[in-house]
Image (tube, rainbow, N blue to C red):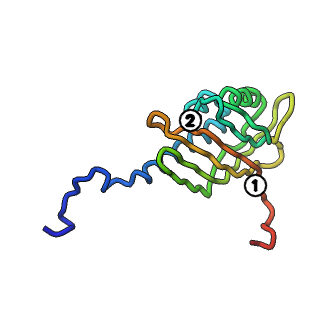
Amino acid sequence: MSDKNKVSTTADESVDYQAKDREAVFEVHNRYMVANTEVDTAKLAEVWDATPTNVYFNLTGHNYRGLEHWSKLWHYYQPRLNMLMPWISWDHNIWVEGDVAWLTCLRLSQAQWVGEGSRGPVDQSLPTVSRATEIYKRVDGEWKAVHVHYSPAALSPRPGNV
């Protein structure tokens, strides 16, 4: 029998599990982007791990500990923002090592401030371009975000065009 006719008896020989995990992490990332656009804490809770010691570095320049703290920020923003365009992301890189994964990307959105109080990073005239590093952990068979770091992205040319 030639090699092309052999039947694999090992379950994982024909499946690229890492590719499936990368796809699953990307799907969770996309669900987060929708939650962020809608400033929807219920959707946020579906993709973020609720461990209270997880730390989120937000574009506001502040750190938020745990899902409850993160949700308080969104409750503040939700009635004060009019999203002019949804959050989109590109330049994705996804790595998986066992039950931990990390994703980097660039993100873009635009919101208009319509409420009272502090705006944070919201500027009515310019889109927000940011960099993201997101850490995911497999929890009970599902990928959940456990840490993110968002920071402003430079729009100017690189020094020396490097």
Identify the residue at image location x=22%, y=53%. Answer: 9
x, y percent for residue 89: 63, 51
Circle 1 — which element?
loop
Q: Is residue 45 left or right of residue 143?
A: right
User: Which residue is located at x 72 percent, y 41 percent?
Assistant: 57
Q: Where in the figure is residue 38, as x and y percent of width and height?
A: 65, 34
The percent coordinates of residue 77 (x first, y second) are 76, 31
Q: Is residue 86 above or below residue 117?
A: below
Which image quarter holds the N terminus? bottom left
As rendered, which of 107 and 51 lies closer to the eye? Answer: 51
In the picture, measured across the screen, residue 87 lies left or right of residue 160, that is: left
Q: Element type at marker 2?
A: helix
Q: Which mark is residue 60?
A: none
Instruction: State left or right for residue 22 relative to residue 65.
Output: left
Q: Quadrant of residue 61?
A: top right
Q: Residue at x 60, y 30 (%)?
A: 51
Which kind of residue does numbered mark 2 sit on?
A: Val
Lateral position of residue 136 relative to residue 87, left or right: left
Residue indicated by mark 2: 47
The residues tagged by marks 1 and 2 sit, at their Cα atoms, a distance apart of 24 Å
Q: Disc 1 marks which residue?
A: 153
Q: Residue at x 84, y 36 (%)?
A: 119
x and y, in percent, of residue 154 in the image: 78, 58
Q: Amino acid at mark 1?
A: Ala
